[in-house]
Image (tube, rainbow, N blue to C red):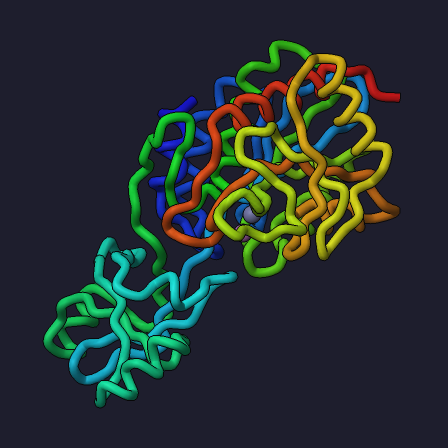
Amino acid sequence: MKELIKKLTETFSPSGREEKIREVILEEIKPYVDEYEVDKLGNLIVHKKGNGKKILLDAHMDEVGFVVTYIDDKGFIRIEPVGGVNPANLLYKRVQFESGAVGTVGIEGETVKQLQENYKNITFDNIYVDIGAKSREEAEKRVKRGMFGGYTTNLEVLGDRLMAKSMDDRIGCAVVIQTLKELDSSPNDVYAVFAIQEEVGLIGATVSAFGIEPDMGIAVDVTGWGDTPKGMKRLAITLGDGPAIKVKDRYMIASKSVVDLLVKTAEENEIPYQMEVLLYGGTDGAMIQKTKKGIPTGVVSIPCRYVHTQSEIVDYNDVLNAVKLLKFTLKKEMK
Ligand code: CO
Ligand code: ZN
């Protein structure tokens, strides 16, 4: 599965520009599903037919990034975030654009004092992207206003841990793909959505859940962590302790019936798990839950450090156990 994770995380597809990642996912999953569809907004919806209840799995395929707002006379580029990007994460890091152009991020400062002050308060107003161009004209041959950009890093295997950009939420995509690959049969009618534009407002999940109208939804996404030096004390999530079953985040309280089902399935099959109460953020699950007359919805989360940076870290065992948990859940007859 590591090869798959490498392929997915090294593909560059920020929110609104999911064409490339959708192609990669489709190629992987096509042989394992009965039918697929790309909807009007670009969600990839796959279907594994069954006679029972309609179960929806959802993982978002976009990643955070930025968009070009302005190119100055000297060819330096100003940007605006797409999704939750901390400008401090970008400074002096290698970035890429849709065109394939690469560059790095610098910061303004006309005096030492001003530079020190800017370092303390890095914003999108005082940083710029340098693609090595000497003029606007030269820059515009590679990058244009309105073009999207983002991180560019390769997957690194660090023992049991994997580090890459866009683990949020390509690791969720990998888990859903692998689950469908391993699911030889199910009493349920299984749909999976690889959703667009989660990072800018859960857009893809909103419309796809409406169209499918499932009996139950399970979003698969990353969650935070509390297990690093002076890590967030109230966030007791530990890499390697198993996939996390969401109880609550800022956008939703997971449906108790789904939480109970996931916990029961984990215990019956001796799959390690941890309960998740996330202090910030939300997932596609929040929108699936509010669809039509209401869809009981839960979330299986992969603990992930440094979310929304170019070096997000997950534990491979959590990933494998998340696949197991979903597979056994889908094999259950739902009432
Ligand atoms: Co995210
Ligand atoms: Zn996510």
Question: Is 73 in front, or is 114?
Answer: 114
287 relative to 53, above or below: below
* Quadrant where the image shows the N terminus: top left
Question: Is 325 in front, or is 278?
Answer: 278
Task: Give percent across and percent down for residue 330.
Answer: 71, 20
Question: Is 42 in front, or is 328?
Answer: 328
Question: Of all residues shown, which one is farthest toward the top?
Answer: 184
Task: Give percent across and percent down for residue 49.
Answer: 68, 20
Horizontally, residue 327 falls left or right of residue 130, namely right
* Quadrant where the image shows the C terminus: top right
Question: Of all residues shown, which one is farthest toward the front?
Answer: 230
Q: What's the residue at 65%, 22% (across, down)? A: 272
117 relative to 236, above or below: below
Q: Is residue 207 visible?
A: no
Q: What's the residue at 85%, 37% (across, down)? A: 256
Horizontally, residue 255 falls left or right of residue 280, namely right
